[in-house]
Image (cartoon, grey):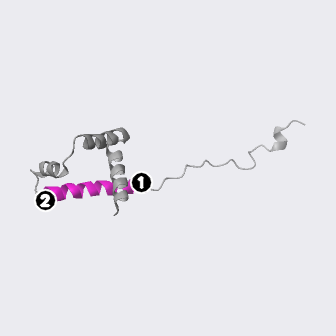
Amino acid sequence: MDDNLIRGEGMKALIEKLGLLEAERFITLIKRDRFDYAKWREEFYKDKTLEDIFHEAAAFCAKEEEKEKAKKLPVKPAKRTARKPAAKRKTTKQLVPA
């Protein structure tokens, strides 16, 4: 995966999760605060086992799969009403006075 694709997918994920404004704010905070990802990762995962991380990732993937399935559900067509039999419908001749 090239850098541009990673940036695009990362922004897409941030926007989906945080919304556009907060995603941009997040990027600004990282740039401004000299964000140290390695230190953050160490703190974030310090109390988690590999099994915990695996289960969180599996739950996230299952949730995302459900979202994708929901997007692909077929849409039911609108219910059509039956037309009146031809004998009961008025013709143009019946509607226009002679």
Query: Main SS of the magenta segment?
Result: helix
- Circles 1, 2 touching at the beta carbon (< 8 Å): no
Secondary structure under badge 2? helix
Q: Amino acid at mark 1?
A: Lys
Of 72 and 37, the residue lying toward us: 37
Secondary structure under badge 1? helix
Mark in front: 1 vs 2: 2
Magenta stretch: includes residue 64: yes
Q: Pointer 2: what residue?
A: 51
Magenta stretch: includes residue 55: yes
Of 6 and 97, the residue lying toward us: 6
> What residue lies at 23% left-to-right and 58% top-to-bottom?
58
Q: Is residue 4 above or below residue 15?
A: below
Would you call the spot at circle 2 few (<14 residues within 10 Å), some (14-19), or many (20 or more)?
Answer: few
Picture coordinates of residue 60, whole percent (x, y)? 26, 54
Left or right: 23 with respect to 37?
Answer: right
Q: Pointer 1: what residue?
A: 71
Q: Which residues are magenta?
A: 50-72
